[in-house]
Image (cartoon, coloured by chain):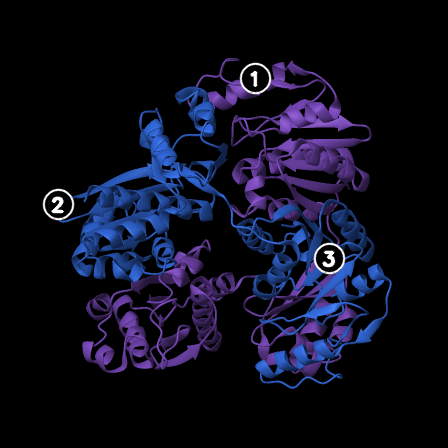
Chain colours: A purple, B blue
Amino acid sequence: MAKITQLIIGDEILSGKIQDLNLRFMAKYLLDKGHELVYSQIIHDNEEQIKYSIKEALQHSDLVVLTGGLGPTKDDKTKMVLKSFLDVDLVECDKAKVQVEQAYRHIGKTWTPETNDYHLVPKGVEPLENPKGLAPGLMAKYEDSYIFCAPGVPNEFQEMFRSVILPKINIQYGEHDIKTELFNIRTVGVPEEVIFGELCPTLWDDLEKFGKLSSLPQVMGVDLTLTLEKDDKLEEKKKSIRELISKSQIARNVWQYGNLDLKEYVVELANKKNITYAFAESCTGGLSASKVTDISGSSKTFLGSVVSYSNDVKEKILGVKKETMMKHGAVSAQTAFEMAEGTRKVTGADIAISFTGIAGPGGGSEEKPVGTVAIGWSTAKETRSKVYNFKGDRLKLKERFAQKGLFRLLKILNRM
Amino acid sequence: MAKITQLIIGDEILSGKIQDLNLRFMAKYLLDKGHELVYSQIIHDNEEQIKYSIKEALQHSDLVVLTGGLGPTKDDKTKMVLKSFLDVDLVECDKAKVQVEQAYRHIGKTWTPETNDYHLVPKGVEPLENPKGLAPGLMAKYEDSYIFCAPGVPNEFQEMFRSVILPKINIQYGEHDIKTELFNIRTVGVPEEVIFGELCPTLWDDLEKFGKLSSLPQVMGVDLTLTLEKDDKLEEKKKSIRELISKSQIARNVWQYGNLDLKEYVVELANKKNITYAFAESCTGGLSASKVTDISGSSKTFLGSVVSYSNDVKEKILGVKKETMMKHGAVSAQTAFEMAEGTRKVTGADIAISFTGIAGPGGGSEEKPVGTVAIGWSTAKETRSKVYNFKGDRLKLKERFAQKGLFRLLKILNRM
């Protein structure tokens, strides 16, 4: 198993222009194979800084993976920095030539040495195949360590890391199957301070008897994660933990023992019970539907959503009465009620959930401020609706509204 | 102006469990005020590593901002690490007490010294208000440098950084308005290598005459970004750049001069021209609608979307003929055609765009593999549809399908 450091080269990340996506990808793969990611560092496209950071990284790890700066343009400096770091010449490399010719053929183009200098590598450095791009990666031995260079574009980096770099690391340093399992207790509706301070002052110590505990506040609620040894008693331990929680003061705040997202959990439960559902979305604008359709297999029970942004659509497709919207407003328990009922009728779903609210920044009033949402739900047995208030900017509010509706759907699915 | 280093403390980030969101947030704010983010480093919740990294960071910057590990649970070690780093005692702090009492009152609870130790801080350290949470931040002077500690939960960190930490940095180190402007040339459909290698070999040098150029491949296409001096000739320079591009071989691949996302650009253009639009989404599952409704003001011209995941919904709401789907399949140019036409009729929109495809991983065939999508468009003048093929996993395909449809919408909006 290797100790690994990641260096992410990118002015665009340090200026906030783009979000790094390669750390999380690499971290997951390393963990699965028992390697340790010592740290990850995002640095500027600056020769001196890159060289200093490689040196520093190699003092704390067996190898370093650099991402970024391998393309064809003049701001792609990684290859020249590596040449300077190793203090060698740039030389023609037959293996690189073959890789590049093949990559260009793959996109229907012909590569020649005049096209670019992708066939030149620092002397002694091995070129690495780039299955999703054109510029080869690089692998250099330096004293007892290795330096890998890969492109920064996420889909190129990720495929090269998965299929080219990781197998080399596994061969060189060994791999092992992880002997622990993460067991998640997912809660909603209470802050960390209230869980451990007020409701369950002994919970931390009680849970740590089973394994290392960590607590992570997420948008939706707090995740308590236990690292459990994969031994004979694993299932027994899980059962004891569930019993412990079910007798505690946070029992009613726990919505799942497991690693699924809310959307995955909803899709799985609806499919298992074979219950169909549909949405009517105003303020969430299709986000709730997009969430469940992120999950493969959702088409088994998810019928669809009517994103009724205009009142006309609410009326024509969902059959919401004009008078209801006139009298109570488009954002009201009454409109949500009719949206849910109309959606169930028009789609034939077993459950319909409706969302109508104000995501802002405009459109709020004293009576109905930004963050107000009416959520309706309709089944063959009953139709109901309720008004809630949340805080946040437009995107956070869309997220919270959608979550609230999915939690409502979960509640109904659990009862059916 | 300050040189700043960010240390992100989080085992959950280095294990790939969660995605860091604080680097990008902080980077944007620093850039706006002329500060330099020297690097950002993600490290483990380990006392020795944290102390080493603080020392290292302060050698390269004026101050360090630590995020994470400030909560109430036993795995929140930052305060104790700071105490050990500064080699001082933990003492009661009246200012912290007042902040914590107020924060608890805000969530309807009462704090007392028995609740937790939020009122204790390392001697000489200033507690910082946490407007969105309960645990105070910390600010320590160390030799000529400053150490700021903030929570890692994104909404808490971001508000504390914006409203508490950044103003202190600005006062201490000065701020200045940026004298440069980023000018984006956004392209679609050609890789970097083809732009600079084949189509426009002199473009890099030609553009660098105006300012520093960088090239960034994104999912959708390549962004060429010029850093332009904000002087008298700014508008003249922009005009010359546009002329240069319009005469080049990539003219038809440029879809925007500016910093807007595709969704922002579409919403802005539709609103400016006052043209209404609506979607019918099968494979994109509401993603296209969710994208445009992320933009405030979209309700002016966006009427809605029918997420017709089931064929029944396609038939009942959109009026797609059963025979069409039976004969050509739900994923076909013919079905997309009828979906677009039906959507325009039922919503009354000026433009309707439809999406029906296979996002996978299941559902593909030899004739229609995963990644196949039929996109339809309908206006008062014409209705048409076309089949495309993309590669990627489910989420990437949803993204590419939605982008393709939004580009189609953009094309139609530009012509109208």
Determine crowd level at label 2: few under 14, some 14-19, many 20+ residues with C-alpha closer than 10 A.
Answer: few
| Callouts 1 and 3 on one subunit | no
Q: SS at mark 3?
A: strand
Quadrant (top left/top right/bottom left/bottom right) for the C terminus of chain A: bottom left
| Callouts 2 and 1 on one subunit | no
Q: Nearer the viewer, residue B364 or B120?
A: B120
In the displayed structure, does residue B240 sit left or right of residue B80?
left
Rendered residue at 33%/70% (across/down) = A363
Q: SS at mark 2?
A: loop
Which amino acid, mark 1? Val
Q: Is residue B367 visible?
A: no
Q: SS at mark 1?
A: helix
Rendered residue at 35%/53% (across/down) = B288
Specify the label residue B146 is tagged with.
3
Rendered residue at 39%/80% (across/down) = A387
Determine crowd level at label 3: few under 14, some 14-19, many 20+ residues with C-alpha closer than 10 A.
Answer: some
Determine crowd level at label 1: few under 14, some 14-19, many 20+ residues with C-alpha closer than 10 A.
Answer: few
Specify the label residue A98 is tagged with.
1
Specify the label residue B381 is tagged with.
2
Residue B282 position in % (x across, y down): 33, 53
In the displayed structure, does residue A177 sit left or right of residue B273?
right
Quadrant (top left/top right/bottom left/bottom right) for the N terminus of chain A: top right
